[in-house]
Image (spheres, coloured by chain):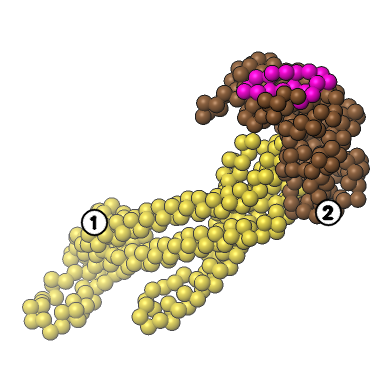
C-alpha cells in the first residue's frame, strides 16, 4: 500500500514539483497516473522509490515510512517494488536470462531460487524461448517484456511502470498493458505512468490526473478525458 | 529475501567484468604498472644512493694522537679501550714512523715539509665510525681515554654528509608519498571512467534493491585483481630494467665507480611493497571511484 499525505517537493533550482499531493493506492489496485510533462509524475515515482525525499508531508510505501527511513533500509524497501522504464534499461552485454539473474543476485537470491523462478517469469511474459537472446536481438515489445520480467522476478508487492509504452507501437503497447493487467490480476499492485490517452481509455481502471504539482482528478473507472492535460 | 554475501560470486563477478570491460581493465593495469615502475625505480635509486652514502660515511674517520710519554706497546694497548667505545667501528694503529713516512710521501718534493724532526710525530689511531652523525660525542669519548693526547677531526665534512643524507632521505620520502598519492588519484580516475560506463548497471542493481555493499564488493575484487596483476607485471619489469641498468653501469668506463646493489636480496621486499601498493591503489581506487555512483 502507498500513502502520500500532503506531499510537497521542491528541487534545488527552486522548481516546486509537488504542491501538496495526497493519494492512496491499496494493495491489488491498478492505477494510471497521467499528466503533461513537468506536472510532477516522475517526482512521485522518485519519491516512492526513495530517490528523492519530500520537503513536507508524509509518505508510506509498503509498510516503510519514507520520512524517517534509514539509508540501510532503502534497499529492502525497494525490494517490495518492481520498476519498469520507458527505455527498458536492460544490460546489453547480458542475455535475457542473465539480466534476470543479475536482478535476483542483487537481492541475494541463491542459485537454486534463481533456477526455479526465472523459467516461471519468462513463461509469464511470453519469452520462455528467448532466454538466451541478447536485448539487441529482440524487438522493442520483447525488450519491454524482459524489463517487466526483471521487475517481477523478485516477486515485488507493486510494479511501477514509468511510460512503459513510450517507445512502442500501438499494438505492442496494448500487449504490454494487457500483460500488466494480467500481472495485476495475479495480485500485484500496478502503477502505470503514461501519456497515452487511447491506451488509458481502453482500460476501465482508476486514473489519477496530475497537473502543476497538484492532483486534479482521481476517479476509479475514470478515463483520460481532459484535453488540457494531454 | 535474506541478503547473502557470497564472496565467490563477488570474485567471479569482479574477474568476469575485467574481461567484459577489457580495454578499461588494460588501461587500469597499464597505469598501475607505470606508477609502480616510476615509484619503484625511484625507491631503488634512493636505496642505492643511501648505500653509497653509508659506504662513504664509513670511510670517514678522525685521528687520536697518543701521549708521547707512552711506549709504542703501551700505545698499541689502547686499541681495545678505544674500540670498546660505542659507535667506534674499528681503530687502526699507526706508529709515528709510519705516520712520518706517509707525511713525507704526501708532501714529497715540497721543501717546506722536508727534514721535519722525528719527534714531531706521534703514535696515533685512525678511528672509523658506525654513525657519522655521532662524531662529536664519539670523539669526546675517545679524547677522554687515558693516554690519548688529543683528537683531530673534520666535523664540517661529517656534518656535510649528515645534511646530504638527511636531505636525500626527506626528498625520497616526500617524492615516494607524492608518487603514491598521484598513483592513487590516477588509478581512481581510471577506475572511475570504467565505472562510469557501468553506472547503468549500478543504477539497475540499486533499483532492484541491492545494498551498497553488494554493489561495491565486485568492484573491490576487480580493483584487487587489477592491482595485484599490475604489481606482479611491474615487479618483473622492474627486475629486468634494474638488472640491465646495473650491468650497464658496472661495465661502463665512466661510471664504474658507482656500485649497484644486486637485485636478488631486494627481490622479496620489492615484490611485497609492489603487491601491497598495488592492492592499496587497486582497492582504494575502485572504492573511491564507485562511491559517487552508489548515491542512487
Q: CA distance from mark 2 to mark 1?
A: 91 Å
Across and down, in percent, residue B284 comes to 57, 47
Q: Quadrant of residue B272?
A: bottom right
Magenta part, dominant SS: strand
Above or below, comparing residue A102 to residue B160 in the picture: above
Label 1 belongs to which residue? B143
The one nearer the camera, B212 or A207, is: A207
Q: Quadrant of residue A188?
A: top right
Task: Evaluate whether residue B124 shows in this view.
Answer: yes
Outermost residue, front side = A227
Across and down, in percent, residue A28 comes to 85, 23
Establish whether labels 2 and 1 are both on one chain. no
Task: Evaluate whether residue B74 shows in this view.
Answer: no
Mark 2: secondary structure: loop
On whether residue A222 falls in the magenta region, the answer is: yes
User: Disc 2: which chain?
Assistant: A
Give the drawing colour for chain B: yellow
Mark 1: secondary structure: helix
Residue at the spot x=44%, y=72% of the render? B260
Give the drawing colour for chain A: brown
Label 2 belongs to which residue? A133
Q: What stretch of residues is rendered in magenta?
A: A206-224
On whether residue A116 falls in the magenta region, the answer is: no
Across and down, in percent, residue B7 comes to 74, 46
Residue at the spot x=81%, y=50% of the render? A139
Above or below, comparing residue A103 to residue A134 in the picture: above
Q: Is residue A124 left or right of residue A107?
A: right
Amino acid at each position: 500500500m502507498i500513502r502520500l499525505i500532503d506531499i510537497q517537493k521542491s528541487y534545488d533550482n527552486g522548481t516546486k514539483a509537488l504542491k501538496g499531493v495526497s493519494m492512496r493506492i491499496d494493495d491489488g489496485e491498478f492505477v494510471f497516473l497521467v499528466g503533461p510533462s513537468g506536472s510532477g509524475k516522475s517526482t512521485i515515482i522518485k519519491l516512492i522509490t526513495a530517490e528523492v525525499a519530500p520537503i513536507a508531508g508524509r509518505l508510506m510505501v509498503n509498510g516503510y515510512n519514507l520520512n524517517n527511513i534509514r539509508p540501510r533500509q532503502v534497499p529492502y524497501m525497494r525490494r517490495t517494488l518492481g520498476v519498469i522504464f520507458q527505455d527498458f534499461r536492460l544490460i546489453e552485454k547480458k542475455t535475457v536470462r542473465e539480466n534476470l539473474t543479475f536482478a535476483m543476485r542483487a537481492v541475494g537470491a541463491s542459485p537454486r531460487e534463481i533456477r526455479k523462478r526465472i523459467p516461471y517469469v519468462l513463461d509469464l511474459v511470453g519469452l520462455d524461448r528467448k532466454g538466451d537472446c541478447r536485448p539487441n536481438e529482440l524487438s522493442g515489445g520483447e525488450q519491454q517484456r524482459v524489463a517487466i520480467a526483471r521487475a517481477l522476478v523478485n516477486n515485488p508487492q507493486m510494479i511501477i511502470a514509468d511510460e512503459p509504452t513510450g517507445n512502442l507501437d500501438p499494438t505492442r503497447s496494448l500487449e504490454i498493458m494487457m500483460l500488466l493487467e494480467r500481472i495485476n490480476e495475479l495480485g500485484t499492485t500496478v502503477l502505470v505512468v503514461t501519456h497515452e490517452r487511447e491506451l488509458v481509455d481502453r482500460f476501465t481502471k482508476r486514473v489519477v490526473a496530475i497537473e502543476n504539482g497538484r492532483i486534479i482528478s482521481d476517479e476509479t473507472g475514470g478515463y483520460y478525458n481532459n484535453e488540457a492535460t494531454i | 529475501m535474506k541478503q547473502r554475501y557470497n564472496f565467490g560470486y563477488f570474485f567471479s563477478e569482479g574477474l568476469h567484468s575485467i574481461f567484459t570491460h577489457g580495454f578499461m581493465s588494460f588501461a587500469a593495469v597499464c597505469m598501475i604498472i607505470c606508477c609502480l615502475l616510476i615509484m619503484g625505480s625511484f625507491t631503488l635509486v634512493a636505496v642505492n644512493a643511501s648505500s653509497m652514502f653509508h659506504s662513504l660515511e664509513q670511510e670517514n674517520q678522525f685521528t687520536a694522537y697518543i701521549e708521547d710519554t707512552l711506549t709504542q706497546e703501551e700505545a698499541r694497548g689502547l686499541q681495545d679501550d678505544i674500540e670498546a667505545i660505542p659507535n667506534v667501528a674499528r681503530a687502526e694503529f699507526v706508529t709515528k714512523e709510519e705516520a712520518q713516512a706517509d707525511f713525507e710521501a704526501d708532501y714529497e718534493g715540497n721543501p717546506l715539509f722536508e727534514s721535519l724532526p722525528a719527534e714531531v710525530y706521534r703514535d696515533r689511531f685512525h678511528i672509523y665510525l658506525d654513525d657519522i652523525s655521532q662524531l662529536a660525542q664519539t670523539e669526546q669519548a675517545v679524547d677522554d681515554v687515558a693516554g690519548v693526547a688529543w683528537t683531530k677531526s673534520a666535523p664540517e665534512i661529517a656534518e656535510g654528509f649528515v645534511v646530504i643524507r638527511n636531505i636525500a632521505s626527506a626528498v625520497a620520502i616526500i617524492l615516494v608519498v607524492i608518487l603514491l598519492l598521484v598513483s592513487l588519484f590516477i588509478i581512481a580516475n581510471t577506475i572511475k571512467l570504467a565505472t562510469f560506463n557501468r553506472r547503468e548497471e549500478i543504477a539497475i542493481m540499486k533499483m532492484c534493491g541491492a545494498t551498497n555493499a553488494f554493489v561495491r564488493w565486485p568492484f573491490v575484487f576487480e580493483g584487487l585483481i587489477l592491482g595485484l596483476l599490475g604489481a606482479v607485471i611491474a615487479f618483473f619489469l622492474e627486475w629486468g630494467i634494474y638488472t640491465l641498468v646495473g650491468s650497464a653501469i658496472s661495465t661502463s668506463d665512466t661510471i664504474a665507480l658507482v656500485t649497484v646493489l644486486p637485485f636478488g636480496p631486494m627481490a622479496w621486499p620489492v615484490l611485497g611493497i609492489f603487491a601491497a601498493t598495488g592492492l592499496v591503489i587497486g582497492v582504494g581506487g575502485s572504492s573511491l571511484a564507485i562511491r559517487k555512483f552508489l548515491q542512487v
